[in-house]
Image (cartoon, helix red, strand yellow):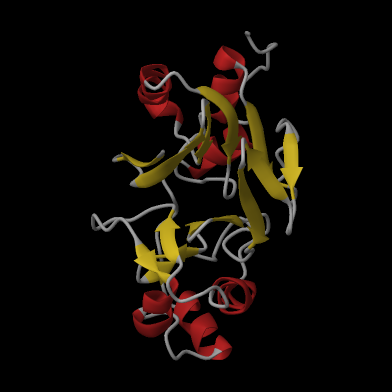
Amino acid sequence: MFRQLFEPNSSTYTYLITDGDQALLIDPVITEIDIYLALLAEHRLGLAWTLETHMHADHITAGGELRQRIGSRSAVGALCGASAADRQLKDGDTVELGNEQLQVIATPGHTPGSLSFLWKDRVFTGDSLLINGCGRTDFQGGDAGVLYDSISQRLFTLPDETLVYPGHDYQGRRVSCIGQEKTINPRLAGKSRDAFIEIMASLDLPKPRLIDIAVPANRRCGVDEEVAPQG
């Protein structure tokens, strides 16, 4: 089973993948935890993993609370600085779920620890590659040149038909594909590295509203104090 879930306050997409009676969540949001628990209960699923594409600045992860309440394990990029996570992921790692595997692709630039996850014919790109856009690079150690390299050398080398499931969309779009983003993404299509850097430097975006709360919390996997998992 595959589900795309949406949290409206931060326009975050969370992804549920299952194999047999096991499940994982990519980028779960703490305010949606009751929805996740109800979905797991409805389908009689055990939650094996919560995966983070990066240290989020616009919401707090549900990974830590899910670990406390139902014993799931959390995984983040090794360069994210989240020492509380159960697993530190690096490029080329795989995350196993039953007979399924997700391949870890390092896609830094939005943040140094940003990751994408490749599963079957789809890639979960977090904030690195969005639909007709990409993540900003003006805070949290972002680097426009590094992001350009990540997208052009890692993501855009995937088959054109690979489905792109982003971490956010603010216009109700749910899915794209590598071929489409290579062709029509206004920040990337036909743009040189220097041109991309110039585009990103000119965005002049406001500071994320929750960054001072969300980033420190997410380094703790979203909880103030860890307790032993139940069950």
Instruction: Residue at 61%, 37% (x, y): give it.
Output: 97
Q: How many marks?
A: 0
Indicate the position of residue 58 as horizontal and vertical percent values. 45, 44
Task: Tell whether 110 sits left or right of 220.
Answer: left
Q: Quadrant of the C terminus?
A: top right
Task: Tell whether 35 sits left or right of 129.
Answer: left
Indicate the position of residue 38 as horizontal and vertical percent values. 36, 19
Q: Nearer the viewer, residue 109 or 100?
A: 100
Outermost residue to the top: 231
Q: Quadrant of residue 74?
A: top right
Task: Tell whether 50 sits left or right of 31.
Answer: right
Q: Quadrant of residue 118?
A: bottom right
Can you say whether 138 is above or below 60 in the image?
Answer: below
Instruction: Residue at 35%, 24% (x, y): give it.
Output: 35
Q: Quadrant of the N terminus?
A: top left
Can you say whether 90 is above or below 96 in the image?
Answer: below
Task: Tell whether 88 sits left or right of 43.
Answer: right
Indicate the position of residue 72 as horizontal and vertical percent values. 61, 24
Asked whether residue 222 appears in the rendered view, the answer is no
Instruction: Residue at 75%, 48% (x, y): give it.
Output: 78
Instruction: Residue at 74%, 37% (x, y): give it.
Output: 87
Q: Nearer the viewer, residue 147 or 2?
A: 2
Q: Nearer the viewer, residue 2 or 82?
A: 2
Indicate the position of residue 213 as horizontal and vertical percent values. 52, 35
Asked whether residue 26 appears in the rendered view, the answer is yes
Q: Nearer the viewer, residue 198 or 7?
A: 7
Q: Quadrant of residue 188?
A: bottom left
Outermost residue to the left: 172
Can you say whether 74 is above or below 135 in the image?
Answer: above
